Image: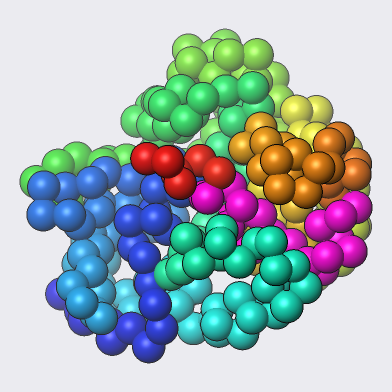
């Protein structure tokens, strides 16, 4: 076990459950088992510390700090966002301690292709089905979990096999993306170097990836915080609080108002819109 001292507010529950990731399991003690790229972690927050165990101890603190974006200065980000839009203050305060999770690019691409016109339980079920069928089984914390396969592991998987994993009409989109990655027509690393605009255009060249899916991929896997994915919750908040309707108008407003932190602003709005009345 390692202990990580927190130097800024961190809301573990909100960060894990606010729709950024799909493969996590809450335990009776309030901790979470979370499936990362190459390992499983269990993370528990007590006061101002994280207590973390894993099946792989190598570089564990570095992995956890990067995954939860613990070293980013969210106070400065918060101050900059509200300085440009005082209407977001309530949503930002409601979301205090919410961090942007830094996910594995390949799994993020697949999960957001699956997310199109789909609910959270169905997305999680599909991802777990793919992992159980093609990923590595790991015994951890009294359970068996499955790492998400690499695209090389899926090279020979057919459209029908994806369909059997309950991904619906997205089966051919997943197959197409996996094929392109294995043929090196797309390289996961290239999006780190590209501008946001270039990255969006490159991703949207692929069937099954529109503006929202591409934006989510860049936000959650590549830390491109200047994207602004628009969903029903955000549309509702923008209509109620800003009297703005239509995706293009919403994105234009976000770009002009929040700029390089549009993606974090939208997480505040999404989290507030979805959870404020619970």
**Image spot of residue 267 (x, y percent):** 59, 55
Q: Main secondary structure of the magenta part?
A: helix
Magenta span contains residue 196: no
Q: Is residue 58 above or below residue 115?
A: below
Q: How many marks?
A: 0
The residue lying toward the viewer, choosing from 137 and 2, is 2
* Residues rendered magenta in the picture: 252-272
Q: Is residue 64 above or below residue 3?
A: above
Residue 150 in view (yes/no): no
The residue lying toward the viewer, choosing from 153 and 206, is 206
The colour scheme of the drawn protein is rainbow
**Image spot of residue 9 (x, y percent):** 39, 77
**Image spot of residue 275 (x, y percent):** 45, 44
Q: Is residue 104 left or right of residue 54?
A: right
Q: Residue at x 86, y 35 (%)?
A: 246
**Image spot of residue 113 (x, y percent):** 65, 33
Q: Is residue 133 left or right of residue 142?
A: right
Q: Residue at x 54, y 19 (%)?
A: 167
């Amino acid at each position: 076990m390692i202990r990580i001292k927190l130097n800024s507010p961190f809301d573990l529950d909100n960060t894990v459950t606010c729709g950024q990731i799909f493969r996590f399991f809450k335990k009776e003690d309030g901790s979470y088992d979370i499936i990362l790229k190459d390992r499983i972690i269990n993370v528990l927050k007590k006061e101002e510390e994280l207590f973390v165990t894993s099946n792989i101890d190598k570089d564990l603190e570095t992995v956890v700090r990067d995954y939860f974006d613990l070293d980013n200065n969210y106070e400065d980000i918060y101050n900059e966002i509200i300085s440009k839009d005082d209407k977001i203050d309530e949503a930002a305060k409601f979301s205090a301690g919410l961090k942007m999770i830094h996910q594995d690019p390949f799994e993020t691409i697949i999960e957001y292709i699956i997310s199109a016109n789909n609910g959270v339980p169905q997305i999680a079920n599909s991802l777990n089905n793919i992992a159980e069928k093609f990923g590595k089984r790991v015994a951890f914390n009294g359970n068996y979990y499955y790492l998400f396969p690499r695209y090389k592991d899926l090279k020979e998987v057919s459209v029908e096999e994806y369909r059997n994993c309950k991904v619906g009409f997205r089966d051919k989109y997943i197959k197409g993306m996996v094929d392109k990655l294995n043929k090196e027509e797309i390289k996961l690393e290239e999006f780190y170097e590209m501008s946001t605009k270039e990255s969006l255009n490159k991703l949207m060249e692929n069937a099954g990836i529109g503006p929202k899916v591409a934006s989510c991929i860049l936000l959650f896997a590549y830390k491109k915080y200047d994207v602004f994915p628009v969903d029903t919750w955000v549309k509702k908040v923008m209509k109620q609080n800003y009297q703005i309707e239509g995706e293009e108008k919403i994105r234009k407003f976000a770009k002009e108002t929040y700029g390089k932190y549009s993606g974090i602003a939208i997480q505040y709005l999404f989290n507030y819109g979805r959870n404020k009345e619970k």
